Amino acid sequence: KAGVTQTPRYLIKTRGQQVTLSCSPISGHRSVSWYQQTPGQGLQFLFEYFSETQRNKGNFPGRFSGRQFSNSRSEMNVSTLELGDSALYLCASSLGGAEQMGYTFGSGTRLTVV
Amino acid sequence: AQTVTQSQPEMSVQEAETVTLSCTYDTSESDYYLFWYKQPPSRQMILVIRQEAYKQQNATENRFSVNFQKAAKSFSLKISDSQLGDAAMYFCAYRSASTGANSKLTFGKGITLSVRP
């Protein structure tokens, strides 16, 4: 079965712009989580969506937002980009229930802000 | 809040030998899951092994096994018969067994494993 698909793979944006990243989870998975990975801070949780509702949110400013559609695909948006937003953004999908069989990650979107 | 600590930033192992990667965590919860993920240069995080806190038996997946010490809050990964393809960054991660507000993975800083031919 198809894995988690993230698009685009690479992105270069200018400070002040906004960006939208997309994630298509594994078929049947209802939970999509987003993580930011940087060399300095490591992997940090952004937010999780389950059945189109945000179920959990990390400690990121309001410039970071997301949504989930009825087909479980998710998008995250970053507005007013800053140099510090340069990172690998990873999406992870799971069934979303209490029984955690593990998350399946996509290959990420590498965002560079110049 | 839960924390995960991987104190060794780098390790090296000879091909075909065994290596153990350390991980400790801190939590006040009694029911949770622990994971080891592998991240090769391709960037995709790959699940290596999973352990449920309520199970005393250590998880095993082929050449990968864990030593789960719940009282000590320790969760180490043993890789036997190391192969060149095992070279990657390895992350230890924690997740509460509850859904909702705690439904997230908390990662350690990771350890870079190199395999010498």
Image (cartoon, helix red, strand yellow):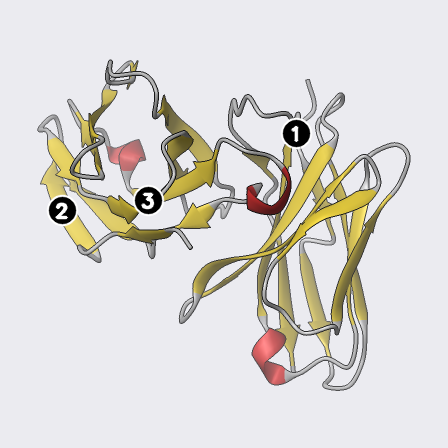
Quadrant location, the N terminus of chain A = top right
| Residue B117 seen | no
Query: Could you tell me how far apart the alpha carbons at marks 2 and 3 are, in whole angstroms?
Result: 11 Å
Mark 2 Cα shell of 10 Å, populated few (<14), some (14-19), many (≥20): few
| Residue A3 seen | yes
Q: Name the foreground residue: B14 vs A44.
A: A44
Question: What residue would you read off at disc 2?
Answer: B12
Q: Position of residue B6 (x, y in %)?
A: 24, 52
Q: Chain of mark 3?
A: B
Query: Could you tell me how far apart the alpha carbons at marks 1 and 2 are, in whole angstroms?
Result: 36 Å
- Examine the image and state in which quarter residue B93 appears: top left
Please report whichever mark, 2 or 3, sits nearer to the chain's N-terminal start: 2
Same subunit under labels 3 and 1? no
Name above or below for residue B83 compared with residue B42. above
- Examine the image and state in which quarter residue A76 appears: bottom right
Frontmost of labels 1 and 2 is 1
Q: Chain of mark 2?
A: B
- Examine the image and state in which quarter residue A18 appears: bottom right
Q: Secondary structure at mark 3?
A: strand
Q: Is residue A54 left or right of residue A105?
A: right
Q: Which mark is residue B88?
A: 3
Frontmost of labels 3 and 1 is 1
Q: Which mark is residue A96?
A: 1
Q: Is residue B43 left or right of residue A65?
A: left
Q: Secondary structure at mark 1?
A: loop
